[in-house]
Structures are given as structure tokens and as C-alpha cells.
Amino acid sequence: MGRIGKGQTCSVENCGKEAVRSVSPVKVAEAGLRLSNPRRGYLCPDHYKEYKKKSRKLSRLEKWRFNTFR
């Protein structure tokens, strides 16, 4: 049983909801969310949805950049 199963809270600043997912703090910072815990990013459903939207845009741009120079 991991930390989320034990009731870890969301690590985004000013959020105390129960976490659903664990994500790399580097990727969360790239998406523009501010974490209170620099080790691991635990996200509630609302912040995870926001993270997915922003990271999708970043990954799409990264794909385009990578494919144009080949």
C-alpha cells in the first residue's frame, strides 16, 4: 500500500484534498503548478486534470519540435 492509499493529501499549495495520483515534481513544475513538497507531486482529481491539460500541450509542442529537425 502506497502513500495515496494511506490518505496522502494534495501537495499543491493551498490545497488539502485527498490525492489520487503521484507525479514527478519536475513534470508538475513544467505544467505550471506550485508544489509545497519538492520530493514528489501528489495531486487531487482537480489538479490532476489541470496537469494533464497543460502537460498535453507541452508534449505536443515537444513532439513537433523533435520531428521538425529530423
Image (cartoon, helix red, strand yellow):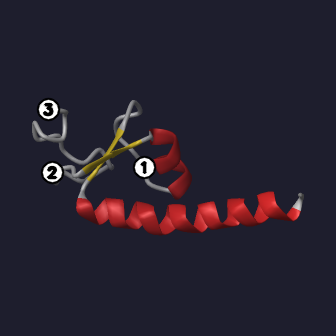
Please report the residue visible at 24 percent of the width from the left and 48 percent of the height from the top. 10
Q: Is residue 53 above or below residue 62?
A: below
Q: Find out whether the residues at labels 2 and 3 contact each other: C-beta distance under 8 Å.
A: no
Quarter of the image where the N terminus is located:
top left
* Residue underneath mark 1: 34
Q: Which residue matches tag 2?
A: 18
For label 2, the SS is loop
Residue 51 x, y percent position in the rendering: 42, 60
Q: Earlier in the sequence, mark 2 or mark 3?
A: 3
- Quarter of the view holding residue 3: top left
Say which quadrant the C terminus sits in: bottom right
Name the kind of residue labelled 2 in the image.
Glu
Q: Residues within 10 Å of mark 2 (few under 14, many from 20)?
A: some
Numbered disc 3: secondary structure: loop
List the residue tagged with mark 3: 1
The quarter of the picture where residue 33 lies is: bottom left
Q: Secondary structure at mark 1?
A: loop
* Residue 51 in the image: above or below residue 43: below
Label 1 CA crowd tier, 10 Å (few <14, some 14–19, many 20+): some
Task: Answer above or below: position of 40 versus 48.
Answer: above
Reply above or below: 1 against 59: above
Is 13 situated left or right of 15 in this image?
right
Gap in angstroms between the C-alphas marked 2 and 3: 16 Å
Camera-nearest residue between 1 and 52: 1
Amino acid type at circle 3 is Met
Lateral position of residue 59 relative to residue 55, left or right: right
* Numbered badge on residue 60: none
- At horizontal 69% and vertical 65% (from top left) the residue drawn is 61
Q: Please provide percent x and percent y for residue 20.
A: 22, 52
